[in-house]
Image (tube, rainbow, N blue to C red):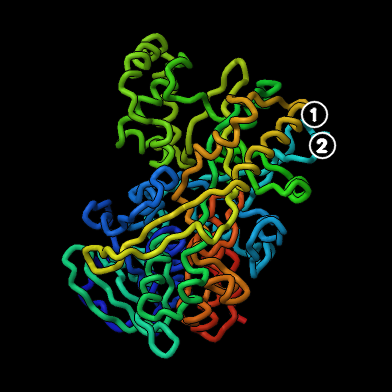
């Protein structure tokens, strides 16, 4: 049931209260409600984006070069940031859970602990099946220092509220409320015993009792609520010098090289395609675990991309058409995620004429491409996630997506400013380190050696060796993945939540967010956060029913 506003919102004891309706929070809520466990979801936003509500997430950026604008990083609306994301779905790798001497983080669980949940996580995100590997490209590569058999998947339905629309309409145990902003988590006797909820527009408030609370408001906003609670109770979450709000990570992303593949077949193998499970997939190039450990490399993935679309010297009518479309905000957001659009479509009006010339010369090919793209993206059950245009030279940009190492000084903290509803605003100080940059550069060098050795291709750097580190640092900026701020750990000195996502200091307060991940890996974090939330769902079901739940397909429950 979908309800607007705080009217009728009363005592929530005996229900699970989930704060946030993104893919993590809504996925957990639907999973619990299918078991008959009553759940209330409190969403700050409305069904559509509202700038008045979105401004509640405004924050100060210590270095605006390093962090995405909050309108890109946070979405206060039903479905959360799934309305903005690119919908990539892939799990963290086993090495991400493995203790590494050069990474200051320890997971309290192993990769195997999430194995039972990937199937349910891909169902919850409408991303096909839990198949994330494919075969080698050359039959069997002569050297296994790198692998090309890792797959990333894409959701066929982008927005979480659309994935779960039928459940929201029909599950009697599920209540989803919009325009309900939680401004305070109330504490008593070492437990969370209620919430203050404000109407997101009028500011009218109501205090409600609650005994099982899950904060799933995204990494930054979840951390903000906990920091506000610690302001009232200074010893919570390790105190001012504790781990809360620290170790903020995203990913290092960008391009410093092109890649030339040895054949058309290899280029084609890196294009998007629909697999036998009914969703788009694509290969990623990744260093093997042994290569990473032996060379103290952070986890990094690579994939080929088209030439920079903003530069009309590519003389491609298709790429110029893409650039012009990306330059128009509403149209560009129909093609790629907003964060990606902004990276490609900077305002360069002096180039418009050159792009138009390209488009006129190659109008027939551009028109055919546009028709096929929009058909495959909006009118097919499998949603085309992006575009990859092959060329006769088999030369492409090489995009990297690299793990960021945790560092306590990369952090968010409360300021003296407050928002319209009285919640303190944040300052965000996302920092990248020399270790991050060095790892990206060295992984490129090792990949180049491997591509040449196995006969798959070669890299072509865009700058001399002595300038590559600076080029990586110049591109280092993120903000959409929000990892590490409330990380999991074995004890409260190293983290905020335990292996079951319960806060060490507040045992009935749970966090379901990418912020609990202690490392950032090479993978986008949403699917892993959804899997952790579904694992939490099993714990909550056992806690509330007294039965151990074994879940296989999402709509079946076997009780022991």
Q: Quadrant of residue 136?
A: top right
Q: Is residue 167 visible?
A: no
Q: Residue at x 55, y 65 (%)?
A: 532
Give the answer, above or below, for where 242 lies relative to 425. Answer: below
Q: Which residue is mark 1?
A: 453
How far across and down, in percent of the image, does residue 531 sit?
56, 62
Taking depth in this image into account, of 240 and 503 the one nearest to the observer is 240
Residue 402 appears left or right of 166: right
Give the answer, above or below, for where 471 lies relative to 230. Answer: above
Q: State the count of labels.
A: 2
Q: Which residue is mark 2?
A: 143
Indicate which disc, 2 or 1, sits on the residue closer to the N terminus: 2
Q: Residues within 10 Å of mark 2 (few under 14, many from 20)?
A: few
Q: Quadrant of residue 36?
A: bottom left
How far across and down, in percent of the image, does residue 197 sit?
27, 73
Q: Residue furthest front?
A: 466
């Amino acid at each position: 049931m979908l309800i607007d506003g705080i009217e009728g919102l009363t005592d929530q004891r005996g229900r699970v209260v989930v704060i946030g309706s993104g893919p993590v929070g809504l996925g957990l809520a639907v999973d619990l409600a299918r078991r008959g466990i009553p759940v209330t979801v409190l969403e700050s936003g409305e069904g559509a984006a509202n700038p008045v509500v979105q401004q509640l997430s405004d924050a100060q950026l210590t270095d605006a070069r390093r962090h995405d604008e909050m309108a890109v990083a946070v979405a206060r609306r039903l479905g959360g940031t799934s309305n903005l994301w690119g919908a990539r779905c892939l799990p963290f790798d086993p090495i991400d859970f493995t203790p590494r001497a050069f990474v200051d983080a320890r997971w309290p669980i192993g990769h195997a602990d999430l194995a039972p949940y990937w199937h349910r996580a891909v169902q919850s995100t409408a991303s096909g099946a839990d198949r994330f590997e494919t075969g080698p490209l050359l039959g069997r590569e002569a050297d296994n220092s790198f692998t090309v058999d890792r797959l990333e998947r894409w959701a066929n339905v982008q927005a979480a509220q659309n994935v779960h629309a039928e459940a929201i309409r029909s599950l009697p145990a599920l209540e989803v409320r919009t325009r309900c902003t939680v401004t305070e988590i109330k504490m008593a006797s070492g437990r969370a015993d209620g919430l203050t909820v404000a109407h997101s527009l009028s500011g009218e408030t109501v205090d409600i009792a609650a005994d099982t609370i899950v904060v799933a408001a995204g990494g930054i906003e979840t951390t903000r609520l906990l920091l506000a609670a610690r302001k009232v109770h200074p010893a919570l979450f390790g105190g001012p010098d504790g781990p809360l709000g620290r170790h903020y990570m995203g990913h290092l992303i960008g391009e410093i090289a092109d890649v030339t593949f040895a054949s058309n077949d290899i280029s084609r193998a890196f294009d998007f395609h629909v697999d036998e499970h009914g969703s788009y997939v694509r290969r990623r190039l990744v260093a093997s675990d042994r290569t990473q450990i032996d060379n103290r490399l952070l986890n990094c993935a690579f994939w080929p991309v088209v030439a920079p679309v903003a530069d009309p010297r590519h003389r491609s009518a298709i790429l110029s058409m893409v650039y012009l479309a990306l330059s128009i905000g509403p149209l560009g957001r129909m093609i790629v995620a907003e964060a990606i659009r902004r990276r490609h479509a900077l305002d360069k009006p002096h180039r418009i004429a050159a792009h138009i010339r390209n488009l006129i010369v190659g109008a027939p090919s551009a028109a055919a491409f546009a028709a096929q793209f929009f058909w495959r993206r909006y009118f097919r059950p499998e949603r085309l996630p992006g575009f990859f245009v092959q060329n006769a030279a088999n030369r492409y940009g090489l995009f990297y997506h690299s793990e960021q190492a945790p560092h306590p000084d990369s952090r968010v903290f409360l300021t003296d400013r407050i928002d319209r509803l009285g919640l303190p605003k944040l300052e965000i100080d996302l920092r990248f380190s020399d270790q991050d940059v060095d790892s990206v550069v060295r992984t490129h060098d090792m990949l180049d050696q491997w591509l040449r050795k196995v006969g798959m291709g070669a890299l072509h750097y865009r700058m001399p060796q002595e300038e590559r580190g600076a080029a990586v640092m110049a591109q280092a900026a993120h903000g959409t993945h929000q990892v590490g701020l409330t990380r999991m750990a074995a004890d409260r000195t190293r983290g905020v939540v335990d292996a079951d996502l319960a806060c060490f200091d507040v045992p009935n307060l749970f966090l379901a967010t990418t912020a609990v991940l202690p490392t950032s890996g090479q993978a986008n974090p949403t699917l892993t956060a959804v899997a952790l939330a579904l694992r939490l769902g099993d714990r909550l079901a056992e806690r509330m029913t007294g039965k151990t739940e074994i879940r296989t397909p999402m709509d079946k429950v076997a009780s022991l």
